Image: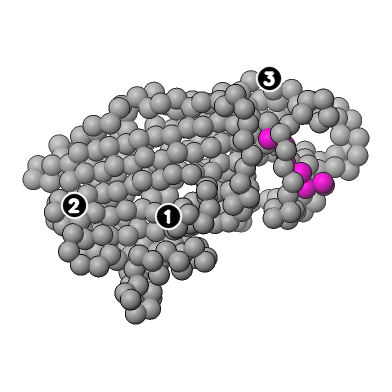
Amino acid sequence: MSDNNLIQTSEFMAYNNDAIEYYTLSTCYIEETCKIKLNETKQRFYDIKRDPYIEIIDFEAIIEKRPTEIDETSSRVLKYKSPSFMASVTFRFPPIHSNECWKVGFIQACDCMIFQNQYGDFGFSSWEFPQLIVRDVSMINDSCGRNYPWYGSKNQVVTIQGPINQQTEHTINMRDLFVPWIPWDIPTCEGEQSCLTHIYRHQRFYVWLCAMNCTKNELLIIHTIRWMQTIEIDVKPDLYRGIRATLISNPEPEQPIFLKRNIFIPSCALQEPSANNAQLLIWKPTQGEPLVVVNPKYRDRSTIKYFSRYLLKK
């Protein structure tokens, strides 16, 4: 059986894009002078003795100290909004006496995602990254997918084009949160029956503050941040909407950690696919064969391997 026969699409009923601020294609502008080949990018840790002196004035990374908000107003889906991860840095960049082009910004990658929605004895649905499931890569780039490798194209990265005869000051920031829609009914049905009983999501990320010399295609890692969130919700399907769902995980999330030692960025985390484009939603019934409900927007060898291993009948 071909994998095309196993695929259904239900974009409205199941939705899992993280909230990322970015310009649309009509307004996004990237400097032509800064085009680079990411598969040839060299990277190393920032060295104050040999590299341009980037003066960090203020650097903060936090997760909002509030519970996940649950929205049961829709008759078809449960929605929740997680606390936001926010990072902001203000820095001064030294004069550039040559024609060099620099970028300073945030790069984020996900190395673990468990996101399962239980529907009683019927089975469960699971959002998955095929690339991580088949272990072809260790991380996956988490960005808007339009300005690799940077997290976004708006406030998350700044371009500094030389020559500039004086020091310049810049502020960049990023924000990430989870805002999924989870069907009350079994996701293959697209109905309004109340079958959802439990939601569990655990996701881990690395965030790097980096400076890239685009002229030399060299990436300098300045700081590395580790953050994660766990969200668990119990659902009583027999109750009325508005009182069905209860947050049972810790209402105050763990705060991000600034690593004492930087780590390198795997090459897979600098290039496509982005997390939002790679993910798929699979339905795994208690009885019967698994079925993909939402297709990945991006397919590669890992996706094909995933389909062959977990979906195609021998």
Total labels drawn: 3
Residue 216 magenta: yes
- Going from N to C along the chain, the mark reached first, 2 or 3, is 3
C-alpha distance separating marks 1 and 2: 22 Å
* Image quarter of residue 293: bottom left
> Residue 177 vs residue 105: left or right?
left
Q: Which residue is mark 2?
A: 119
What residue type is disc 1 on? Ile
- Front in this rendered view, residue 7 or 179: 7
Q: Which residues are magenta?
A: 215-221
Q: Which residue is mark 1?
A: 133
Point 52% across, 66% down: residue: 301
Is the residue under label 3 in contact with that under label 2 (CB below 8 Å)? no
Residue 220 sits above or below residue 132 on the image: above
Kind of element beneath mark 3: strand
What residue type is disc 2 on? Tyr
Q: Which residue is mark 3?
A: 57
Residue 300 magenta: no
At which x and y percent is residue 177? 43, 38
Point 24% across, 38% down: residue: 233
Point 38% across, 76% down: residue: 4
- Front in this rendered view, residue 61 or 260: 260
Residue 112 sits above or below residue 272 on the image: above
Q: Nearer the viewer, mark 2 or mark 3?
A: 2
> Residue 238 vs residue 58: left or right?
left
- Going from N to C along the chain, the mark reached first, 1 or 2, is 2
Residue 28 in view of the camera: yes
Which quarter of the rendered picture does the N terminus lie within?
Answer: bottom left
- Going from N to C along the chain, the mark reached first, 3 or 1, is 3
Hey, which residue is sitting farthest bottom in the picture?
A: 1
